[in-house]
Image (cartoon, grey):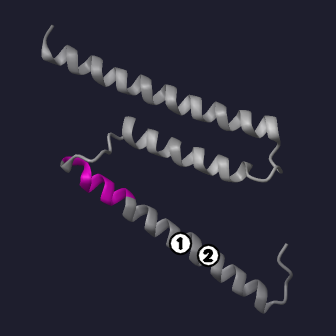
Amino acid sequence: MDRRTDMHRRERRRYVIGYGGSLLLTFVVFGIAYQFGIETPGVYMTIGLLGLAQLVVQLVYFLHIDRRRSSREDLDLILFSTLVLLIIIGGTIWVLGNLAMRMHMHVM
């Protein structure tokens, strides 16, 4: 077997494992929401943690982000983009909350 075929087989295996892991985590989230209801305490935390686990699975298996030196720049780019998004979302919530307070609106 030549090297290219072996690399193709390993790459396909990684994609199948990533797809199976993502699908399993998605079904687990739907199962938890269906079984316990969305209003049950702790369901949001569980869904959030499983969402983070799915993010890690997709970063590792689909985007090939790991601890190697070559993919560290990609990880830095993803972390910076996440920071910018969090600043935008946090600033929006802060501004809209301040606006609601100044207009004497009751927050629901």
Residue ranking furthest to the front: 42
Residue nearer the viewer, 76 or 96: 76
Which residue is at 81% across, 40% downward? 36
Judge the density around disc 1: few (<14), some (14-19), many (≥20) Cα neighbours within 10 Å. Answer: few
Vertical order, 1 against 23 (above or below): above
Q: Provide the residue designation for mark 2.
A: 92
Q: Provide the residue designation for mark 1.
A: 88
Judge the density around disc 2: few (<14), some (14-19), many (≥20) Cα neighbours within 10 Å. Answer: few
Which residue is at 22% across, 46% downward? 68
* Residue 89 is at least partly visible in this image: yes
Vertical order, 108 against 3 (above or below): below
Q: Is residue 21 left or right of residue 36?
A: left
Which residue is at 77% across, 84% downward? 100
Residue nearer the viewer, 35 or 7: 35
Q: CA distance from mark 2 to mark 1?
A: 6 Å
Looking at the picture, which amino acid does disc 2 mark? Thr
Region in magenta: 70-78
Give the overall secondary structure of the magenta segment. Answer: helix
Vertical order, 52 against 29 (above or below): below
* Cβ atoms at labels 2 and 1 below 8 Å apart: yes
Looking at the figure, which quarter contains the C terminus? Answer: bottom right
